[in-house]
Image (tube, rainbow, N blue to C red):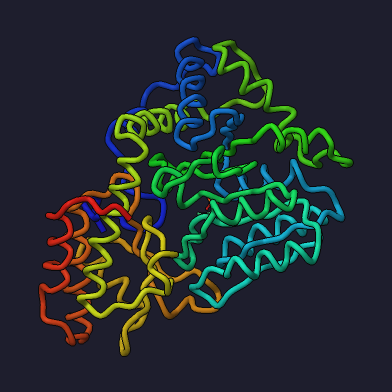
């Protein structure tokens, strides 16, 4: 493996040079006016990225999983009913977090690779009152894209708070936290937001902040209590120094550089680019005869592809693709781990990266003896989409 290998996994991803430059700059004091400006601006930008004008953003040192715990810890009391709209491994993780907090957790499930029907959600919502409904916007283990807007709208009608795990979607998929009625949207820095791993991001609506205040039991974790963080976020936004726990100065500067690039591109242009890239990949997969684990194209992510190994091919394909200069990921869902692999295509991915990746996969398949396609058909199909207009759906 060399530094020239193309990293095409569902996070971390290839980062823009300005983002990495920000990471390598001299570490300023977290109270230096220049850093206060950077962090304050980042918090404002995060709100724009998530379409959340009235929400309070929090950015802490930690992974996406910490952002999940931050969301759950501040609104769940022991004995609360929590409903998980389950699309895979990360939905299960949210359920485990809620269970640790003493919640009674129910699931709305579907077969692996499918999004549960909204009728099943409605049925669950009429049978019991749920304080919270959680969903995974893109479940990175299955490539399923959940209909977040509808789920949240149904959940709010029945009086629940909504939590959306947007770790693999924010910055790549269409997402409007406020108008989609999401109380807490959360993410991590290393996926479509385009910065190195290490930051947990979560935005709280006023209702979510009220839910924290109304909690019967204070969070056992001091670090995860938003009551500690709210004054910090407010201080940085009004460009004033403050301290609770030292912010990871360099990572925050890197994320600030990345969100600036996101907003310069424009959120709707960025979402359109992700669709275009994913359509180019989908055309290639079809030409090569590679089936997606996620069954419905309308409920399939634009930030990654989860692909079943064709007959006669196993996980050693991943090593063969790496030998061709591209790094892809293996399966993650425990029920199908050895049956599929994943290609991340989010953040800075460009048309040329699609061709590099498809070419590497074609050559690796041929080397492994899978020859049911004519060499070059995947490349031609992808290139046709790349050369065409941006799709609207
Ligand atoms: C990656 C991911 C997480 C976990 O993020 P970490 O930074 O690995 O802790 C959670 N949810 C989804 C949907 C993810 O893709």
The residue at 50%/22% (across/down) is 39
Residue shown at the point (57%, 69%) measured from the top left: 117
Q: Is residue 180 left or right of residue 22?
A: right
Number of residue marks: 0
Q: Nearer the viewer, residue 180 or 165?
A: 180
With 236 as the anchor, is 3 left or right in this view? Answer: left
Between 80 and 73, the one nearer to me in the picture? 80
Quarter holding residue 244: top right
Residue 67 in the image: x percent, y percent? 61, 44
Q: Is residue 211 left or right of residue 324?
A: right
At which x and y percent is residue 330?
41, 69
Q: Residue at x 45, y 79 (%)?
A: 338
Q: Say if 148 sits above or below 333 in the image.
A: above
Quarter holding the C terminus is bottom left
Rendered view: 352 above or below 211: below
- Front residue of 327/283: it is 283
| Position of residue 232 measured from the top left corner of the image (x, y, whole percent) | 64, 21
Q: Identify which residue is drawn at 36% across, 57% down.
A: 302
Task: Point out the residue furthest to the right here.
Answer: 216
Q: Is residue 162 above or below residue 377?
A: above
Query: Which quarter shows the N terminus?
Result: bottom left
**Quarter of the view holding residue 331:** bottom left
Residue 352 on image: x %, y %: 16, 53
């Amino acid at each position: 493996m060399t530094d020239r290998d193309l990293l095409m996994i569902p996070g971390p991803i290839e980062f823009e040079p300005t983002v990495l430059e920000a990471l390598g700059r001299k570490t300023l004091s977290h109270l230096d006016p220049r850093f206060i400006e950077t962090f304050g601006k980042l918090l404002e930008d995060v709100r724009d990225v998530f379409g959340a004008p009235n929400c309070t953003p929090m950015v802490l040192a930690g992974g996406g999983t910490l952002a999940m715990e931050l969301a759950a810890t501040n609104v769940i009391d022991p004995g609360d009913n929590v409903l998980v709209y389950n699309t895979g491994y990360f939905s299960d993780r949210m359920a485990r977090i809620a269970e640790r907090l003493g919640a009674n957790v129910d699931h709305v499930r579907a077969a692996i690779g499918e999004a549960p029907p909204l009728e099943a959600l409605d049925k669950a919502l009429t049978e019991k009152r749920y304080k919270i409904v959680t969903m995974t916007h893109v479940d990175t283990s299955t490539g399923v894209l959940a209909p977040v807007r509808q789920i949240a709208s149904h959940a709010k009608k029945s009086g629940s708070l909504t939590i959306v795990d947007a770790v693999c979607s924010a910055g790549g998929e269409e997402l409007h936290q406020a108008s989609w009625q999401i109380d807490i949207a959360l993410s991590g820095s290393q996926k479509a937001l385009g910065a190195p791993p290490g930051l947990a991001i979560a935005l709280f609506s006023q209702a979510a902040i009220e839910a924290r205040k109304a909690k019967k039991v204070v969070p056992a974790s001091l670090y995860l209590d938003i009551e500690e963080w709210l004054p910090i976020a407010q201080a940085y936004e009004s460009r004033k120094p403050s301290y609770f726990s030292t912010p990871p100065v360099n990572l925050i500067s890197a994320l600030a550089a990345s969100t600036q690039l996101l907003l310069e591109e424009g959120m709707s242009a960025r979402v359109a680019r992700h669709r275009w890239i994913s359509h180019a990949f989908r055309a290639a997969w079809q030409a090569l005869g590679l089936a997606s684990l996620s069954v419905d194209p309308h409920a399939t992510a634009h930030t990654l592809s989860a692909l079943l190994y064709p007959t006669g091919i196993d996980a050693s394909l991943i090593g063969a693709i790496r030998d061709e200069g591209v790094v892809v990921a293996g399966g993650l869902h425990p029920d199908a781990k050895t049956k599929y692999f994943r290609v991340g295509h989010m953040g800075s991915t460009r048309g040329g990266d699609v061709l590099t990746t498809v070419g590497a996969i074609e050559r690796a398949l041929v080397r492994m003896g899978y020859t049911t396609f004519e060499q070059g058909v995947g490349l031609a199909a992808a290139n046709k989409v790349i050369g065409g207009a941006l799709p609207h759906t």
